[in-house]
Amino acid sequence: MSDTATHIDEHDHHGPEQGRGVMGFIKRWLFTTNHKDIGTLYLCLALFSFFLAGGMALLIRAELFEPGHRFLDPNFFNQMTTMHGLIMLFGVVMPAFTGMANWQIPLMIGAPDMALPRLNNWSFWLLPFAFVMLGSTMFQSGGGPNFGWTMYAPLSTKFAPPSTDFMIFSIHMMGLSSIMGSINIIATIMNMRAPGMSLMKMPMFVWTWLITAVLLIAIMPVLAGAVTMMLADRHFGTSFFEAAGGGDPVLFQHIFWFFGHPEVYVLVLPAFGVISEIIPTFSRKPLFGYHFMVYATVSIALLSFIVWVHHMFTTGVPLGAELFFMYTTMLISVPTGIKVFNWVSTMFKGSMTFETPMLFAVAFVFLFTIGGFTGLMLALVPADYQYQDTYFVVGHFHYVLVPGVIFALFAATYYWIPKWTGHMYSECIGKWHFWLSVISVNIAFFPMHFLGLAGMPRRIPDYALQFTNFNMISSVGAFIFGFSQLLFLYNVIRTIKHGKKATDRVWEGAHGLEWTLSSPPPYHSFTTPPVIH
């Protein structure tokens, strides 16, 4: 009997036996349907893509270090800006948060696994193939896509390289993966919660992911429609976006941004969820205004569908439309402001300690808010005429995406990795990683606002002499930021291999079902569902 028990324990820990040796290892990871394994695969893909797309960003910044010199071919520079954007969005942020959702949602709601495990496996394995297809464009004749990640027609239809078709199909595959992953997450959250866990008792991270999944199902078909119309314009003689044939290039922008703006919230809502888990833990207080947080998240999701034209104020849309979208854009800042207020109120009079996850979470609140304010400046139509297509916009969205979303990913990794691996990370390396990142990210992106105000356009490989100083500062900051991430990589690998043993409830202030399980959790999380009172 005891032998059987030991065997079951081992089996529980290592997953199903698929044979020995290399083939056994490949089969174990290729055919896995376990939420933790698939979560780990997503996170590994995101980590690899992060360094790949980060390398592209450093090439861009090396070219922009000073005017006049040709470090990169201008066409290659444009390919780098396109690929950097696409891979960072679809290959880093989305897979990383999906990996965390796969790991955490069953643990947080007391489920044994995800609702649709085979679908889960398929949604992941579509991605590597999609990215290989996207990457292959760089090695084809005419080079990779060179029209920026927003793929505006006619640059992407009439004047684009032949490899664009490969990019279109890879986007279809990524979209399919996102839709199936979302269906799985919604099915899991709606059907597999522990007895007694009503919707209003769910952790904030689960809530934000539920709403994100709904958004994804709503918008991914729109993107699929846009890229299919691009394909038709390129090969089948249609004129959706061709003015000479009765189409309209601005129509592409409308369809793209109808996907694109909710997509921004797809990236940032899970980050809000993570921060709403971390700040209460290290403030040792429950989250202030939980109900309002839920309502704010829902209202952000609803409003995100009616703000898209703020990307297009200078395209000649009617004045009435400009006014409407200006007001809705300002309106969307209200629920975001509620969130920031609630995070700050949670910290107020809490007995706070500043471990690495908390440091990243606090930096998130401050720097994300700066990104929010510059967004409000861009929402003003008359002002936007000045800012449109300048580095001010680049500064704005990088403040939201890097110190916002990427910092939330770091915070979540440091927060949960002891639970995932059973080992503690090195706090000293974590703090070094934080301070180098937070200082360099501001050196990299803050000067961009000044460059934009002075009129430096985006997406150019060369520029006028007066912009040199700020660009130099920006490039230095970018390189420090890029190389600081090697500390993060080292810390993660070190934690997995030989970090100190972690306790079950890793953090003193942590509350929630995931902290009731062992560290690392058993292969099937909750075989008997916990009862919530």
Image (tube, helix red, strand yellow):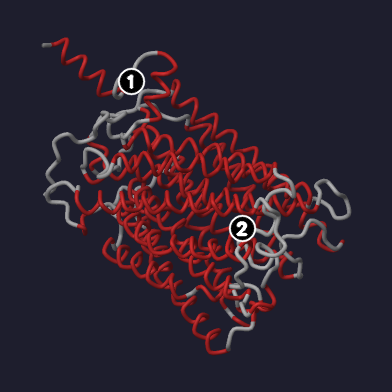
Q: Name the mark on residue 18.
A: 1
Residue displayed at 31% across by 56% down:
210
Mark nearest the camera among 1 and 2 is 1
- Crowd band around label 1 with a 10 angstrom C-alpha radius: few (<14), some (14–19), many (20+): some
| Amino acid beneath label 1 | Gln
The answer to which of marks 1 and 2 sits earlier in the sequence is 1
The kind of residue on which mark 2 rests is Trp
Instruction: From the viewer's perspective, tell me whether residue 409 is left or right of residue 50.
Output: left
Does 440 sit above or below residue 237?
Answer: above
50 and 408: which one is in front? 50
* Tag 1 near tag 2, CB within 8 Å: no
- Give the image location of residue 426, x and y in percent: 48, 29
Task: Give the position of the N terminus as an image quadrant.
Answer: top left
Q: Position of residue 200 (x, y in %)?
A: 21, 59
Instruction: List the residue tagged with mark 2.
Output: 149
Q: Write the residue at 58% across / 43% down.
A: 133
Circle 2: is it few (<14), some (14-19), or many (20+) Cα within 10 Å?
Answer: some
Q: Find residue 415 and report its image quarter.
A: top left
Q: Residue at x 50, y 66 (%)?
A: 261
Q: Where is residue 410 drawn, in percent x and y?
A: 48, 43
